[in-house]
Amino acid sequence: MYDIEKIRADFPILERTVYGHPLVYLDNTATSQTPRTVVDEITRMYYTSKANVHRGVHALSQEATSLQEATRERVRSYINAASTREIIFTRGTTESINLVASSYGNFLENGDEIILTVMEHHANIVPWQLLRRHKRVTLKVVPINERGELKMNAFRSMLSERTKLVSVCHVSNVLGTVNPVKEIVAEAHAMGIPVLIDGAQATPHMKVDVRDIGADFYAFSSHKMYGPTGIGILYGRESLLKQMPPYQGGGEMISHVTFDHTTFAELPYKFEAGTPDFVDIAALARALDYIDSVGMDNIAAHEHDLLEYTTGRMMEIPGMRIFGTAPGKSAVISFLIGNAHHYDTGMLLDKLGFAVRTGHHCAQPLMAALGIEGTVRASFAMYNTREEADRFIEALHRIAPMLA
Ligand code: PLP
């Protein structure tokens, strides 16, 4: 049984009010809330175990190091990577993708092509554009159909001997579309092309198995999956990471340094320059424990129920336009009411206690393709309820006439 009251009690922020209304937090795509066990672990680390990792012989340093490495193993098993050498801690999905762009990017030549999709977050667009400061690389963009699904024939027609990387999101942060990443990888690999998957919106909502998908790189963020802020993960296939040059230089990532020459540390440390955010890394393990304790299949079923129910009821609102209607989509609803500006809708909802996101959602090229400036976005997590969905629909009924 899905014990929603028990789950909600583990997230103290859900008890607060906003402008005198109980908070209804529907901005989970931007960041999800954090359970008590994760915050407790951060406090415990600061109060009892804080010491810099890897550099000390003393007990505290060894404890902190063990916790960090235990999280690395926890993440490895969570996404079924082959080895902890393939798990690199970063600041977030954005840094994970920048790491690949700046390091793997060295292998690209003028005239090479990278395939992206029109639904990418800016984090999976701009790092590739920055490469153009050094190399004349071309970005090819896979379009979508009216439901917000990738046009796979267009994707296939873009693959060529000039393609050096395919970089696609697993789940769209605007449309909720779950892309056929396994198929994309199979098609790209058939031509010897590696694939990076931006998993920022997948890991909080579904089981991810990087080996089953066949991903070469898989990037995601802790703060979107009930974990602490400031931590991201880059999974990379060991054979590729081994060949890639370091991303940043500094402490921890070296083997030996002289003023003439430096040799680098083994994986994964080669890509982890400087003191890592070891407190939050340790606490990330508690977030993964929390997800496991509820069960990812249960979370996915719960969110799917909320998505179906809310989407169905939103259609009662005159002028409702929902962007992204792919079957099996993730629990994110981007919408506009008639011609009302997304910002006005968001502001009215805010005054009633609803935290929704408005704007382009860091996906301006997608907005341009949809012919709009932005949307209002409501997104669900494991702790949202049908009662909240009902209150959301009531609020939409109340504000729609004001916006008309
Ligand atoms: N990719 C997608 C699909 C996202 O939704 C986000 C954040 O919203 C990012 C990348 C960037 O994640 P972060 O800001 O945690 O680096």
Image (cartoon, rainbow, N blue to C red):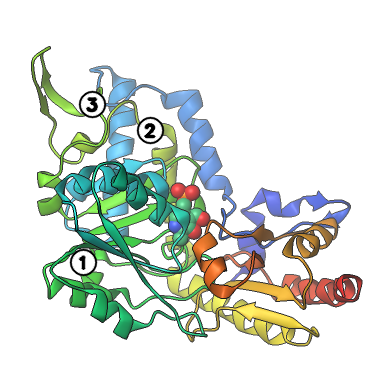
Q: Position of residue 161 (x, y in %)?
A: 12, 69
Residue at 49 percent across and 86 percent down: it is 327
Q: Is residue 306 above or below residue 283?
A: below
Looking at the image, tell me whether mark 3 or mark 1 is earlier in sequence order.
1
Nearer the observer, 295 or 263? 263
Residue type at mark 1: give it.
Answer: Arg
Residue type at mark 2: give it.
Answer: Phe
Residue type at mark 3: give it.
Answer: Glu
Image mark for residue 211: 1
Q: Position of residue 132 (x, y in %)?
A: 30, 47
Callout 2 environment at 10 Å: few (<14), some (14 to 19), or many (20+)? many
Pair 3/2: label in front: 3
Looking at the image, tell me whether mark 3 or mark 2 is earlier in sequence order.
3
Residue 290 visible in the picture: no
Q: Is residue 244 above or below residue 179?
A: above
Nearer the observer, 369 or 189? 369
Looking at the figure, which quarter contains the C terminus? bottom right
**Residue linked to disc 3:** 252
How far is mark 1 from mark 2, CA to CA?
27 Å
Looking at the image, tell me whether mark 1 or mark 2 is earlier in sequence order.
1
Nearer the observer, 81 or 332? 332
For this orientation, the residue located farthest to the top is 259
Determine the image quadrant of residue 375. bottom right
**Residue linked to disc 2:** 278
